[in-house]
Amino acid sequence: MLIRQVQALDLAGGSRRELDIRVEGGRIAELAEPGALEPADEKECVLQGRGLVCTPGFMDVHVHFRDPGFPHKEDIETGARAAAAGGFTRVVCMANTKPAVDTPETLRYVLEKGKRTGIRVMSCATVTKGLKGRELVDMETLREAGAVGFTDDGIPLLDEGLVRQAMEQAAALDMPLSFHEEHPGLIAQNGINRGAVSEGLGIQGSPHEAEDCLVERDCRLALETGCRVLIQHISSAVSVELVRKAKAAGAHVFAEATPHHFSLTQEAVLEHGSLAKMNPPLRTEEDRMAIIRGLRDGTIDVIATDHAPHSKEEKARPLTEAPSGIIGLETAFALGVTNLVRPGFLTLEELVAKLTLGPAMLYGLKPPRIALGEPADLVLFDVEECWEVKGFLSRASNSPFLGEKLYGKIKTTVCGGEVVYLPGN
């Protein structure tokens, strides 16, 4: 494969320059001045990169592919196609499937199906057996079977003693734990922020304190145990500040923000109904801007989608009965360009870092690079192209961004030296 005259952005190497890139055997084999390389023969795949930026493929550390258990919503194959369309060459699946990923057998099922998708599908295992919050899984055995971390995402862990024990074991194994921070004892109806909008709808909703109290606990425990901890889908200004202080104190705490939490506020529920319902909920403009400040100053290390497919029938239920969550893989990058880069909150380099370097650091992976001998996991995109969100490769379509015009268009995704996404193919 030959990629010609592309702006190659190598954050780990600290460079941005126009290059020709040749790929052989799944790796970057040649880097040359633009226009210097010619096709080796008539069979070589040639991608024209003029006017495009090329970076290492994105990594999403928080996806729900619903397989096993709920393939009518999404399966590993369709989820991977959506990921590739969004520029993601690596994803980390959450463990709240049916059965839950709490045994080597279920974990192997996910990983084996992932190997057949064309992208790199990784998976967490659960923290507790059956997602019940009472007994820890055998972390060492699951790590040996291929788990890259542990999470009961979707279900908060309330037993502080158990959480401490989990952190101590994970720290000994040098494995990250990811936490869904919402205390159910403080929530009347989940998915909608407790505030002016919920009051107008006659819904009590979910206050930010439900998130803040668990974030405070887990930042404290992370500092005490030395565990590498991820605060998932942070949504509250108070929680952002708690993470900021924990980092300053030396805790090994990471935080992730979703595109919907830095793009929308609670008012979106009035326009989009259940398509703007998620856990934790969209909150106020003050919270949204706190998340953006956290992204800008490094408090928030990672942008992840929490890609959560549901069927149209499920989302068509009344607001308080419809399930929470939206899909996000195919719009994540464009929302970052539109709502972070173009307004001047982040540079393009900073946005790409949240999609590549931050996730790699969380999981202890080698920083992805555009350099000789490195894996040819690459994404080509046009930062300036404006496009309308319509139609998805995901099996689901539950997105409040349908019909929106966004900037930043993924043009080609390459994984392991193979084209896994090319519009029109």
Image (cartoon, helix red, strand yellow):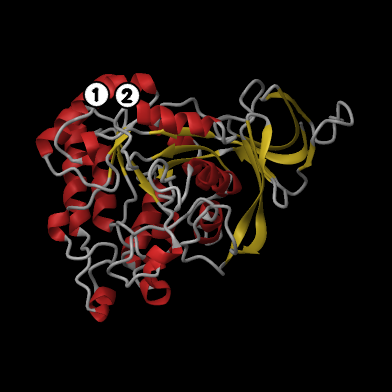
Residue 241 position, x and y percent, is 26, 50
205 relative to 223, above or below: below
Q: Name the amino acid, label 2.
A: Leu
* Image quadrant containing the N terminus: top right
User: How would you rate the neighbour count of disc 2 (Cα within 10 Å): few for under 14, some for 14-19, many for 20 or more?
Assistant: many
User: How would you rate the neighbour count of disc 1 (Cα within 10 Å): few for under 14, some for 14-19, many for 20 or more?
Assistant: some
Disc sitting over residue 206 in the figure: none
Q: Furthest residue to the right?
A: 42
Query: Residue 372's quadrant in the figure?
Result: top right
Residue 158 vs residue 393, the one in the foreground: 393
Q: Identify the residue shown where x is 14% and y is 44%.
A: 158
State yes or no: discs 2 and 1 in contact (Cβ < 8 Å).
yes
Residue 217 vs residue 298, the one in the foreground: 217
Disc sitting over residue 142 in the figure: 2
Q: Furthest residue to the bottom?
A: 200
Instruction: Find disc 1 in the rendering and name its residue.
Output: 138
Q: Name the amino acid, label 1.
A: Asp
- Confirm whether residue 128 shows in the render: no
Residue 366 vs residue 146, the one in the foreground: 146
Going by the image, does 254 lie left or right of 53? left
Going by the image, does 129 lie left or right of 118? left
- Confirm whether residue 246 shows in the render: yes
